[in-house]
Image: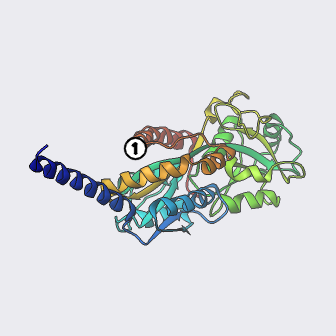
Amino acid sequence: MNSTVKHFRSTILGAALAAAACGVLAQAAYPCKVVKLVSPYPPGGTTDILARLVAPGMAKELGTTVIVDNKGGASSNIGTEFVSGAPADGCTLLLGNNTGIVINRNLYKLRLDPVTSLAPIVEVASVPLVLYVNAAESAKTFDQLGAAIKAAPGKYSFASGGSGSPQHLMGEMLKLELKADMTHIPYRGQGPALQDVIAGQVPVAFETTTAIASQLGSGSRIRALATTGSVRSKNLPDVPTMKELGHDNFVVENWYGVFAPAKTPPALVERLNRDLVKVLKSPDVAKSLAEMGSRDVAGSVDQFKQFIAKELPYWESLVKRSGAKVD
């Protein structure tokens, strides 16, 4: 091999190694010293739990600081709008859910449409809801609760984390299925709603398996009567699904995902997706998600976009059929 060929190969190898090194450096150099992960609800609900679950892994993968920022109110619209209008630099992200992304647009006159003002990054979790009552209620089954509600028109109320939330819509669907009157009591987040049912201020509510699991068990002040999944929850194997009980309209899950402002560069969105998928599939986080009752839903940016596109007509129809209004 002559010296010219050797020099050529050496030059090519050196260039390749330099390019690889630059690639590693580019991957490591996230553009923000601090990333604000906005949870559009107060502390204590499922969205907040998930944000705090993924934040440490995000910080490790991105090589930066990740702070969970709770901006609750207006059924998640305040926090969702805050991120929608933030600079598209990857420094402000949203851990949103189906309420803020695909439901509220059917109920509120929003200044920004989340579907067009946010860029989907990755789906984080999807969990069924649980119909539960305060333990002081005499109803031990769904049928007993239904009979009690129908026997006392206007007496019963149900709590939710805000108007337009899946928990609210399931309460409206419950009224339709039972052909009974109930009063909706909206709160500024699922955490406060759950606490008031535990305290006996409101008798009935729907909540995700994520937020309610730790509140159930021996000596609990609440009682689970049914879930809204297509099959029984592994975490609540003794609790029947609404579908089992003859209510097919109640096959519903709450889903959650991470979003960036719409004009965030596609390469940065893809970078965030890759790093977040690593976090979500890491053993500790995957175990925690499974314990919360979530399916493994982490996938590509395109998969998340396609999923949201399918969700839009479903929730629009459900809002119309249920007659849900903003309280």
Residue at horizontal 85 percent and vertical 54 percent from the top: 221
Q: Is residue 103 visible?
A: no
Q: Quadrant of the C terminus?
A: bottom right
Q: Position of residue 25 (x, y in %)?
A: 34, 62
Choose top left, top right, bottom left or bottom right for residue 27: bottom left
Colouring: rainbow
Left or right of 273, for residue 289: right
Q: Which residue is mark 1?
A: 305
Q: Secondary structure at mark 1?
A: helix
Residue type at the position of mark 1: Lys
Q: Report x, y in % for residue 224.
A: 79, 43
Q: The N terminus is located in which quarter?
A: top left
Figure check: 279 above or below 35 = above
Q: Position of residue 243 (x, y in %)?
A: 68, 29
Dot 1 crowding, Cα within 10 Å, few <14, some 14–19, many 20+: some
Is residue 235 placed above or below 189 in the rendered structure? above
- The residue closer to the viewer here, 172 or 129, is 129
Please, is residue 184 above or below residue 90 in the view?
A: above
Indicate the position of residue 187 as horizontal and vertical percent values: 65, 62
Q: Quadrant of residue 57?
A: bottom right
